[in-house]
Amino acid sequence: MAPPPGPYSGTSTLALVARVSAFSVGVVYGAIKLKYVKAKAKSQQKAHAKAHH
C-alpha cells in the first residue's frame, strides 16, 4: 500500500523530521515515566517495610 503523495508521503524531509521528533519525545517520556514509577514503587516498599517493623 503506497502512501498518498504530498508533504506527508513519508519521503519528505518534513515527515521524516516529524517522525523522528515524535519518536524522541516518546522515548524521553517513557524514560521519565519509568524513573517515576520505579521511584514510587521504592518509596511504597520503604513505607510498607516501616509499617511491619
Image (tube, rainbow, N blue to C red):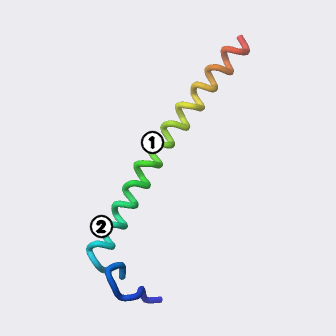
Camera-nearest residue between 41 and 8:
8
Q: Is residue 22 left or right of residue 51?
A: left
Q: Residue at x 51, y 36 (%)?
A: 36
Q: Residue at x 37, y 67 (%)?
A: 19
Give whichever of discs 1 and 2 has the lower sequence position.
2
Amino acid type for the residue under numbered disc 2:
Val
Amino acid type for the residue under numbered disc 1:
Ile
**Location of residue 13 in the rendering, given as x and y in whole percent from the top left corner:** 26, 74
| Residue holding disc 1 | 32
| Residue 5, above or below 17 | below
Q: Is residue 45 left or right of residue 16?
A: right
Q: Residue 12 sits in which quadrant?
A: bottom left
Helix, strand or loop at disc 1? helix
Taking the view exactly as shown, the residue that stands out farthest to the right is: 52
| Residue holding disc 2 | 17
**Location of residue 29 in the rendering, given as x and y in whole percent from the top left corner:** 44, 48
Camera-nearest residue between 49 and 17:
17
